[in-house]
Amino acid sequence: MKTAILLIISNIFMTFAWYGHLKYKSSPLWKVIIVSWLIAFLEYCFQVPANRLGHSQYSAAQLKTMQEIITLIVFSVFSVLYLKEEFRWNYAVGYLMIIGAALLIFKK
């Protein structure tokens, strides 16, 4: 559970680092790069411990898969609430297909 919580926190920071600047298109690119790097540093402060702890229970492929599923969920919430973008039905179907593929990776 610690691994998942750390990955969720990590992904929140990562999503803001990668996509938060889209609301500030008039800001100079060099500024948003610096701010994004600073936010990404915080992301790493949670992501690295998550993988370090998680690797005692999960394979690297399973950790990466868990991270990607969490990323899809965090990004979906972010894009709707922060960027005010519409969540379309085809996104949900595509995400469900990816989650189905993830289940194969966790199958013993």
Image (tube, rainbow, N blue to C red):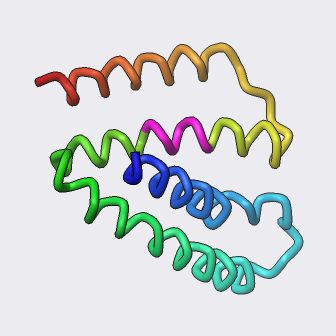
The correct choice, above or below, for 108 with respect to 40 in the image is above
- Range of residues picked out in magenta: 69-74
Residue 54, percent across and down?
27, 54
In the image, farthest residue toward the front: 1
Q: Does residue 50 appear left or right of residue 43 in this picture?
A: left
The correct choice, above or below, for 36 with respect to 21 in the image is below
The correct choice, above or below, for 34 with respect to 73 in the image is below
Quadrant containing the N terminus is top left
- Magenta stretch: includes residue 73: yes
Quadrant containing the C terminus is top left
Q: Nearer the viewer, residue 40 or 34?
A: 40
Q: Nearer the viewer, residue 8 or 2?
A: 2
Residue 105, percent across and down?
21, 29
Q: Residue 93 is drawn in which quadrant? A: top right
- Magenta stretch: includes residue 16: no
Residue 90, percent across and down?
61, 16
Residue in view at x 65 percent, y 36 percent = 76
Q: Does residue 108 appear left or right of residue 47 in this picture?
A: left
Q: Residue 106 is drawn in which quadrant? A: top left
Residue 36, percent across and down?
64, 75
Q: Does residue 25 appear left or right of residue 65 in this picture?
A: right
In the image, farthest residue toward the left: 108
Residue in view at x 24 percent, y 41 percent = 62
Q: Does residue 73 appear left or right of residue 29 in this picture?
A: left
Q: Nearer the viewer, residue 36 or 73?
A: 73
Q: Nearer the viewer, residue 47 or 57?
A: 57
Q: How many marks?
A: 0
Q: Main secondary structure of the magenta part?
A: helix
